[in-house]
Image (spheres, helix red, strand yellow):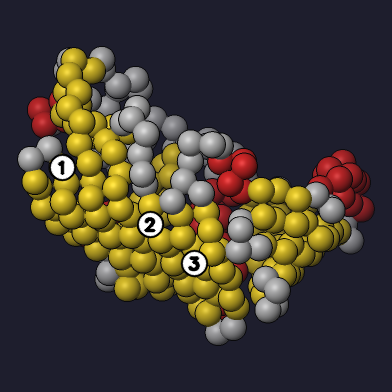
Amino acid sequence: MASTGDVRYDGIDGIRVAAQLDGNDLEHVLIDATGVDLTARMTEDGQSAGADTTPAEPPAIVSRTSGMLRTARIVAGPATVQGYAVHLDVTVSDAAFDWVEYVSARDAGRSASAFGIEDSPETARLSGSFSARMRASDIAPLIRAVATPMLATTGVRLRRLEGTVTVSRRQVVKVRALASVRWKIFGATVRAAVSVQITPAAIVDVKRVRLRSWNPIVAIALLAARRQVRAVEGQRFDLNEEAGATAPRISNLRLSAGDDLAISARFG
């Protein structure tokens, strides 16, 4: 069985970044991933796509200088992930940060890595918006393309993955999925059905969760999981409360599903 490794992404170098400075502030930053082809792959323990000389713990900070990100935009119109098109548009305004200097370079091979940007302890007025969409029919193939190499490192082969996502006018999201896997000589098919309602105020009501398999061995293994997921039914989760008082609040959260599966929200 192959050892578990890290996820590496090819294609990141194709992302374009432009920034406009005004003293210690970043007046505008544009991160454009349009046309970039991102591919995730697994690397075994101790191996990577290149020499990684970044220490596990960052060196001590010797100086901090406050700055402000006035406006930023992250756009992909679209980028491809594992060959599937994803449209993304994120805007951010008024994000406090610190320019920092470390006692030594974080990457021994790059002297410029002795400098960086970190979150500021100051209270930020961060606000912005987020939207993303992709073809609904691409969701299951994309998940399969990402999950297959990850599961392979544990000796599990994902032979089949199908799924559908529907969203009602009241933002009740229903997901039905079927996965067929094989581990050594054992094969099984697992079916899952989930129904949740997500409000514009970012409150999630769990309506229904079901897991089942016709394989008796897998069915027994699912018993414990089934009890846990059944306990979630009827519960309500406030995403803003879960994020904490200091996190930007999510509002106007919208979902839709047709030919495309889309999500958008504001935060601040």
Which residue is painted at 34% across and 20% down in the image?
57
Q: Amino acid at mark 2?
A: Gly
Question: On the image, which quarter does residue 66 sit in?
Answer: top left
Residue 78, position in %: x, y? 34, 73
- Which of the two discs, 2 and 3, sits closer to the camera? 2
- Density class for disc 2 (Cα within 10 Å; few <14, some 14-19, many ≥20) is some
Residue 117, position in %: x, y? 23, 34
Which disc number belongs to residue 264?
3
Q: Is residue 41 left or right of residue 60?
A: right
Q: Circle 1 sits on which residue? A: 25
The answer to whether 249 is drawn above or below residue 84 in the figure is above
The answer to whether 166 is drawn above or below residue 116 in the figure is below
Q: Determine if residue 159 is in view.
A: no
Residue 54, position in %: x, y? 27, 27
Question: Residue 14 versus residue 204: which sits nearer the camera?
Answer: 204
Which residue is painted at 30% across and 21% down in the image?
58
- In this rendering, the count of numbered labels is 3
Q: Earlier in the sequence, mark 1 or mark 3?
A: 1
Q: Circle 2 sits on which residue? A: 128
Which residue is painted at 16% across and 51% down in the image?
27
Q: Is residue 114 left or right of residue 268?
A: left
Q: Is residue 176 left or right of residue 108?
A: right
The answer to whether 53 is drawn above or below residue 148 in the figure is above
